[in-house]
């Protein structure tokens, strides 16, 4: 069909477009232009540019997942070998790269638990998933999407999940125990094997949210902790960039008894070539595909390159430096009168800490959100916490292994400067940020479901 009128395309000159996007890039904070220490729970480490370049090579970008496997042996080998590395790091027996991120990986673990219990005739009875209040919210939300009832374990006085509380709720209805360890407070539960053993005694499965694994590489594994399933965020621990919310991979591993329930295909090697294996799955009970094809291949490639460049000793060094950086930051900040961190007094944390600025708020009326906005004026940032706030006036910092001591000191001095402003010149904080094109916004809409519009059609329905 031939058009009768030309398309209504915008007529903008290339220089104007170039200036527009260059300016936007200058207005954006990120790990390439500032000291990125503050995005706690997200492990925003340095992503080597050479790995990005590898993923942009035509040998990668011109592949298509529908190609004959014999014509894509290179990427199949890389994905298979990355699977082997994940097994070694975790102790699991097989991995799938289909999940698009951590939340979907948790949903996959919940779906695997359901498939396993249904295959054993207990699918209807086992309708509860147990998690902890300081695990990632997705550890509750994703199983709820699958249809499970969620039971939360509160922390004991030291911040550890309460073992006595687990004893009270675990039973014949328990499908799975899904937790992060260390939790988002940075507190590591060294008794976790007792928790998983108890769940197993009652017939449940155990899933490990390893989004906080950066301080554990080469130190401890999911298998020895008694878990049946686990996942790693390749876009966190394994240094593939977050990419503004994507692309990502929640690499999900399982023990042998759960392999038949994984989404097909897996990638195997028969001694001569790599191939897509559909035959391992139980056709009656497999959870089926959870996304198209076999995951985001360029992300797996970047993680593969990062692992190969470091080796086993390098991965262990990553964990040691990440823990060292975090505890240096921890000790420096805990020396300030207006900063505290609940639980495990006098003990180290793993890779991050959830601090509280409650005393600063009581003294000055300045909230953690106010401090957060003022930090933007210095080209820095930090994350508070997911909602609702269980730690009052939270500030969650995770330096990773990337920053130098000089970087950490600069971040600490900036925080100290802003804290001092809270006591001496609070108005400059209340009106911040002053150096940003985006100033204070009304966040009330975010808490009003009547104003949520998750699609264009929903927006039209609510506004017309």
Image (cartoon, rainbow, N blue to C red):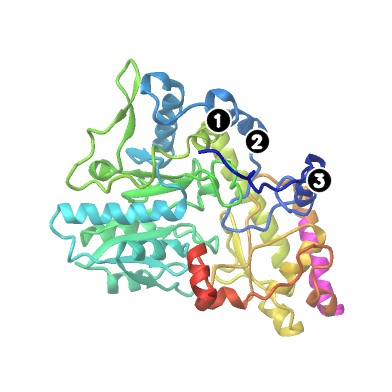
Looking at the image, tell me whether mark 3 or mark 1 is earlier in sequence order: 3
Q: Secondary structure at mark 2?
A: loop
Instruction: Mark 1 and mark 2 in contact? Answer it, CB < 8 Å.
Output: yes
- Compared to 57, does 92 lie above or below? below
- Horizontal placement of 192 versus 405: left or right? left
Q: Is residue 405 above or below residue 63?
A: below
**At 54% from the left edge and 64% from the top edge, which residue is drawn?**
185
Q: Is residue 85 above or below residue 118?
A: above
Residue furthest to the right: 424
- Residue 358, x across and y down, in percent: 66, 78
Q: CA distance from mark 3 to mark 2?
A: 31 Å
The disc placed on residue 194 is none
Front one among 31 and 182: 31
Would you name the residue on which mark 3 appears? 16
Is 84 left, or right, of 339 in this rendering? left
Measured as percent of width and height from the top left, residue 363 is found at 75, 84
Residue occupied by mark 1:
305
């Amino acid at each position: 069909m031939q058009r009768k009128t030309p398309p209504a395309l915008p007529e903008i000159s290339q220089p104007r477009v170039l200036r527009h996007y260059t300016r936007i890039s200058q207005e954006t904070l990120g790990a390439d232009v500032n000291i990125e220490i503050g995005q706690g729970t997200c492990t925003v480490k340095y992503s080597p540019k050479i790995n990005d370049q590898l993923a942009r090579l035509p040998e990668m970008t011109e592949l298509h997942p529908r190609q004959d496997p014999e014509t894509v042996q290179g990427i199949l080998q890389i994905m298979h070998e990355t699977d082997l590395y994940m097994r070694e790091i975790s102790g699991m027996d097989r991995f799938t790269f289909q999940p698009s991120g951590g939340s979907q990986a948790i949903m996959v673990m919940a779906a695997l638990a359901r498939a396993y219990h249904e295959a054993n005739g207990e699918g209807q009875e086992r309708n509860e998933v147990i998690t902890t209040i300081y695990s990632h919210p997705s550890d509750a939300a994703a199983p709820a999407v699958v249809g499970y009832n969620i039971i939360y374990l509160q922390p004991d006085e030291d911040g550890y999940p309460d073992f006595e509380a687990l004893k009270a709720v675990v039973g014949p209805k328990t499908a799975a125990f899904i937790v992060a360890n260390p939790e988002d407070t940075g507190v590591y539960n060294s008794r976790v094997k007792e928790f998983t053993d108890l769940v197993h005694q009652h017939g449940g499965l155990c899933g490990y949210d390893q989004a906080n694994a950066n301080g554990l590489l080469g130190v401890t594994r999911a298998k020895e902790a008694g878990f049946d399933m686990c996942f790693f965020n390749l876009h966190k621990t394994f240094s593939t960039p977050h990419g503004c919310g994507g692309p990502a991979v929640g690499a999900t591993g399982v023990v042998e008894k759960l392999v038949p329930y994984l989404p097909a295909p897996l990638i195997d090697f028969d001694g001569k070539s790599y191939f897509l294996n559909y035959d391992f799955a139980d056709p009656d009970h497999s959870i089926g595909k959870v996304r198209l094809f076999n995951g985001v291949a360029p992300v797996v490639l970047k993680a593969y390159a990062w692992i190969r460049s470091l080796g086993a000793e390098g991965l262990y060094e990553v964990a040691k430096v990440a823990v060292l950086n975090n505890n240096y930051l921890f000790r420096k900040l805990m020396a300030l009168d207006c900063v505290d961190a609940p639980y495990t007094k006098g003990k180290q944390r793993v890779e991050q800490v959830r601090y509280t600025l409650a005393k600063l708020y009581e003294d000055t009326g300045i909230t953690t959100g106010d401090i957060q906005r003022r930090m933007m004026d210095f080209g820095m940032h930090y994350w508070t916490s997911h909602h609702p706030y269980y730690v009052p006036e939270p500030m969650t910092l995770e330096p990773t292994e990337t920053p130098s001591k000089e970087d950490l000191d600069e971040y600490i001095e900036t925080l100290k400067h802003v804290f001092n402003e809270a006591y001496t010149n609070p108005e400059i904080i209340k009106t911040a940020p002053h150096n940003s094109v985006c100033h204070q916004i009304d966040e009330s809409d975010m808490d009003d479901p009547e104003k949520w519009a998750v699609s264009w059609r929903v927006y039209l329905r609510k506004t017309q």
